[in-house]
Image: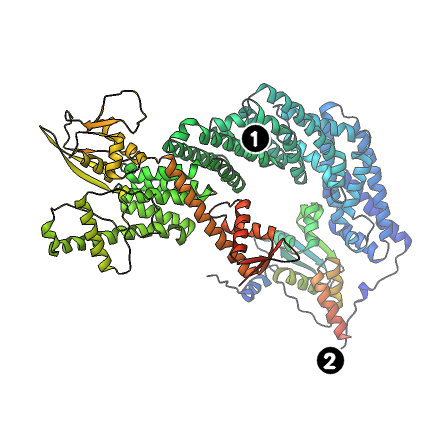
């Protein structure tokens, strides 16, 4: 080290041994000064002199004289103050206490400043710091003294009570006095908590218990909610104004318990309560209720359950209303309406809370699957819309409706049933040329696709392809007819054929009929043409879903009748007969009697009657096979073209049964596929696990019945896809 | 983008002589009765706001509003003026130059006035010097 090793130690700083008398002199000087400070006469004292005195004492290791002396002086002073304060009467008490306290606090800061060197260099734990010592003496000799403490707390609580009842009190005074409890607390605000806060919270609970009981019995729920909200705002303000912030959460909790938690059940059940609000769409009141209930434990659970219960109940009413059961359109419209309504409640009142939305959705799921009507009703609803119901809606409205349809669809547990019905009605729309817009059809299908994937819509898309290809095929056929040699021999008729790929389309119940020779010939020609162009294909004629236009010559007028193929066949019979019984019609056309009945009905009982029943039997609706019909030559109709519905729009029960059967058939295949898939990957599995896994896999399409899965397992065992373990009959093994 | 321009050296230069000359902004006098030159008083013309924010001692002094606060001056005996000048230099500029000659004297004063940074620095300095 190159630095010069000389340190100059100045003479005057050499520590001298301090005489006891010198120490005593310095202490007396300080003591006099402290007493002056306590009498608020500090301005003439020299800070430096006092500081230097305390400094000198400490460095001379005489700090003990100073510290014990200070303790005594404080002790003495606070005891004097107690008497002074305790004598003050009524309101003067608080004012006197507060002014003495404020002065005392200032004095203690000053004393601390003078004795800063003592405070920092001498005081060691567990001794109190100079300022804390002052606080402690105040607490010991003034604040918690029996003459002060109880009187003070009672007066403070009395003032708060008055303020809660609407009177104006001195907030600054409150703040100062309450803060005093905090200031004299040595750690964790213990004095404040013990002496003030505990009693304050108790008084608060007490106050709000009686207020809330009284208010809620004399007012509506809405008024009560508003009252609670105001009270909570007031208490929040009270915390800021004069309480210690650590009391905030406890105070609010106490208020919430008394004002909300204890009355939740009442608020839900009372006549003007939650139920009524939901019923009457009182969004603002519900919103307030939501906000308040949110603050207490389990509050929202109560509200949510009540709301979900109401939703379920309303939904249940709708799906079971007799009128709705008859009218799918009304049913779905009402469902969309309540969905809209509850979505509004959810967004306006319940902040679109996830739990609330989920429980509403669960409710929808439960009532929508209460009976098996919904799949078909929904399919029919869309059918009606796509047949022209969308005519007056703009794109946006259409999109909204379609999305609602998808929403309801999402809740269906048996989506496969819906799919069958949808395909069925789609087929009918396409074949009867009743679809309003192919664009809309495709939009709807793309929404299903988004929801359920390709597999769900592949058949529907196949139908559209068929329609397009059919058109090409038909054009080709017409050209072919032009060049065909046989053509010359045949009278010309305008025939339109649609080639439907089996599998894409619903299988229509097979019905046979005898076509007139001319039509048969045309059919044969088409078959010949088509099978030549597409080798290996086979054509099966499905006459029961065809339509025809027939010229109807009356003595004075000619009409064109738009008929089903069956109706055409029946009408053609009248070319050779004047009167025909139903039995004869059936014999002449080879159509089943049931179809004859259905076909004839619109012809004689609709607005325009081309057939009449002889003898006319007005009221009997049942047709027997011996009923006789003849052409109605007196038909009066201004229209040239008359259209007859082949069948009613909704399907007959047998058709519906047929659709259901096909769903069941499809389900068997799906279940088989699922079982095989699972077993192939797991190799061996216990019966119950297989059932669970299988149900899980299929749940997006339908909810399979356990009994059905069992049957399919048996079937697969028979077909040797699976086998049971010989030693454990409950386990299956996959046979590759 | 963010950037900070600093010119501490300039700041220190500007503040170095701030307490040497009396001007209209000075509001607190520090008077030294130097034991070495008993007949000569040295006066520093300082600023309450700076002393208050840089030193615990002066903060306490101003807060207590005693005689010195009222009169706007303080008298130190038994402190040499060049040591006081160094302490004030530190208060105003944040830098302190020590030599072997004055280290101990500054250390004592720094302890009395609570400059823990100086105390630590000097303790190391002295330890190294011995």
As helix, strand or loop, the secondary structure at mark 1 comes to helix
Q: Estimate the x, y position of residue A301 in percent, counting from the top left.
A: 59, 36
Q: Residues within 10 Å of mark 2 (few under 14, many from 20)?
A: few
Give coordinates of residue A130: x percent, y percent: 78, 47
Residue B17 numbered mark, or none = none
Residue linked to disc 1: A229
- Residue drawn at the location 65% of the way across and 38% of the way down: A248
Q: Position of residue B21 (x, y in %)?
A: 59, 59
**Chain letter of disc 1?**
A
Q: Is residue A8 visible?
A: yes
Considering the numbered disc 2 on the image, is that residue within a helix, a strand or a loop? loop
**Spatial separation of the CA atoms under disc 2 and disc 1:** 77 Å
Say whether residue A168 is left or right of residue A206. left
First in residue order: circle 2 vs circle 1: 2
Front: mark 2 or 1: 1
- Quarter of the image where one finds residue A299: top right
Which mark is on residue A1?
2
Q: Nearer the viewer, residue A111 or A385?
A: A385
For label 1, count other residues whose C-alpha is less than 10 Å away and answer few (under 14), some (14-19) or many (20+): some
Tell which of A417 and A731 is nearer to you. A731
Name the foreground residue: A190 vs A530.
Answer: A530
- A149 left or right of A385 in image: right
Viewport quadrant of the N terminus of chain A: bottom right
């Amino acid at each position: 080290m190159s630095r010069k090793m000389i340190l100059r130690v100045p003479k005057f700083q050499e520590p001298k041994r301090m005489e006891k008398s010198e120490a005593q002199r310095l202490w007396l000087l300080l003591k006099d000064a402290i007493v002056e400070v306590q009498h608020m006469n500090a301005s003439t004292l020299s800070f430096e002199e006092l500081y230097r005195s305390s400094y000198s004492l400490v460095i001379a290791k005489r700090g003990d004289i100073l510290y014990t002396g200070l303790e005594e002086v404080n002790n003495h002073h606070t005891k004097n103050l107690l008497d002074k304060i305790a004598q003050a009467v009524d309101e003067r008490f608080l004012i006197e206490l507060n002014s003495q306290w404020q002065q005392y606090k200032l004095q203690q800061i000053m004393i601390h400043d003078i004795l800063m060197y003592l405070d920092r260099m001498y005081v060691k734990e567990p001794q109190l710091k100079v300022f804390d010592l002052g606080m402690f003496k105040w607490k010991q000799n003034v604040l918690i003294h029996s003459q002060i403490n109880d009187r003070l707390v009672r007066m403070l609580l009395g003032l708060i009570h008055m303020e809660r009842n609407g009177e104006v009190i001195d907030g600054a005074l409150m703040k100062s006095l309450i803060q005093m409890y905090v200031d004299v607390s040595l750690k964790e605000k213990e004095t404040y908590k013990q002496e003030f806060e505990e009693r304050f919270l108790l008084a608060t609970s007490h106050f709000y218990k009686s207020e809330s009981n009284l208010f809620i019995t004399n007012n509506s729920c809405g008024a009560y909610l508003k009252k609670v909200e105001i009270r909570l705002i007031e208490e929040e303000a009270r915390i800021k104004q004069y309480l210690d912030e650590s009391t905030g959460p406890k105070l609010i909790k106490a208020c919430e318990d008394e004002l909300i938690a204890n009355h939740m059940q009442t608020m839900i059940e009372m006549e003007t309560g939650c139920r009524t609000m939901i019923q009457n769409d009182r969004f603002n009141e519900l919103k307030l209720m939501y906000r308040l209930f949110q603050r207490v434990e389990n509050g929202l659970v109560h509200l949510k359950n009540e709301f979900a219960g109401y939703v379920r109940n309303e939904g249940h009413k709708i799906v079971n209303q007799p009128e709705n059961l008859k009218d799918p359109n009304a049913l779905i419209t009402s469902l969309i309406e309540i969905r809209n309504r509850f979505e509004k409640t959810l967004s306006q009142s319940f902040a679109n809370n996830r739990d609330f939305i989920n429980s509403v959705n669960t409710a929808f799921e439960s009532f929508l699957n209460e009976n098996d009507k919904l799949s078909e009703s929904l399919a029919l609803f869309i059918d009606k819309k796509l047949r022209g119901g969308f005519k007056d809606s703009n794109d946006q409205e259409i999109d909204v409706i379609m999305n609602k349809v998808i929403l309801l669809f999402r809740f269906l547990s048996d989506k496969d049933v819906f799919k069958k019905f949808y395909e069925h009605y789609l087929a009918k729309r396409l074949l009867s040329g009743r679809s309003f817009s192919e664009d809309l059809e495709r939009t709807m299908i793309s929404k299903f696709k988004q929801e359920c994937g390709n597999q769900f819509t592949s058949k529907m898309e196949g139908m559209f392809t068929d329609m397009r290809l059919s058109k090409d095929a038909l054009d080709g056929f017409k050209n072919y007819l032009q060049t065909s040699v046989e053509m010359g021999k045949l009278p010309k008729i305008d025939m339109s054929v649609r080639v439907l790929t089996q599998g894409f389309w619903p299988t229509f119940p097979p019905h046979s009929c005898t076509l007139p020779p001319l039509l048969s010939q045309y059919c044969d020609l088409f078959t010949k043409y088509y099978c030549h162009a597409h080798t290996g294909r086979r054509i099966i004629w499905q006459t029961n879903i065809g339509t025809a236009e027939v010229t109807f010559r009356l003595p004075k007028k000619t009409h064109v009748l738009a008929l089903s193929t069956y109706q055409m066949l029946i009408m053609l019979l009248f070319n050779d007969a004047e009167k025909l019984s139903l039995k004869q019609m059936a014999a002449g056309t080879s159509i089943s009697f049931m179809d004859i009945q259905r076909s004839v009905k619109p012809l004689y009982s609709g607005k325009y009657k081309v057939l009449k029943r002889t003898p006319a039997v007005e009221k009997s609706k049942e047709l027997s096979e011996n009923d006789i019909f003849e052409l109605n030559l007196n038909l009066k109709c201004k229209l040239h073209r008359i259209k007859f519905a082949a069948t009613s729009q909704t399907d007959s029960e047998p058709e519906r049964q047929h659709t259901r059967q096909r769903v069941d058939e499809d389900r068997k295949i799906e279940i088989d596929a699922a079982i095989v898939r699972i077993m192939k990957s797991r190799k061996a599995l216990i019966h119950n696990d297989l059932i669970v896994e299988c149900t899980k896999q299929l749940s997006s399409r339908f909810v399979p019945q356990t009994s059905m899965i069992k049957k399919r397992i048996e079937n697969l065992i028979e077909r040797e896809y699976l086998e049971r373990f010989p030693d454990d009959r409950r386990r299956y093994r996959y046979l590759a | 983008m963010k950037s900070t321009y600093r010119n501490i050296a300039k700041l220190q230069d500007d503040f170095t002589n701030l307490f040497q000359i009396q001007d209209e902004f000075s509001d607190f006098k520090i008077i030294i009765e130097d034991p070495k030159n008993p007949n000569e008083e040295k006066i520093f013309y300082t600023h309450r706001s700076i002393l208050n924010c840089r030193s615990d001692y002066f903060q306490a002094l101003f807060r207590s509003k005693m005689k010195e606060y009222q009169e706007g001056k303080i008298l130190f005996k038994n402190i040499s003026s060049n040591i006081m000048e160094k302490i004030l230099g530190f208060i105003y500029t944040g830098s302190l130059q020590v030599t072997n000659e004055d280290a101990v004297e500054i250390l004592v004063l720094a302890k009395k006035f609570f400059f823990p940074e100086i105390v630590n620095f000097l303790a190391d300095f002295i330890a190294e010097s011995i």
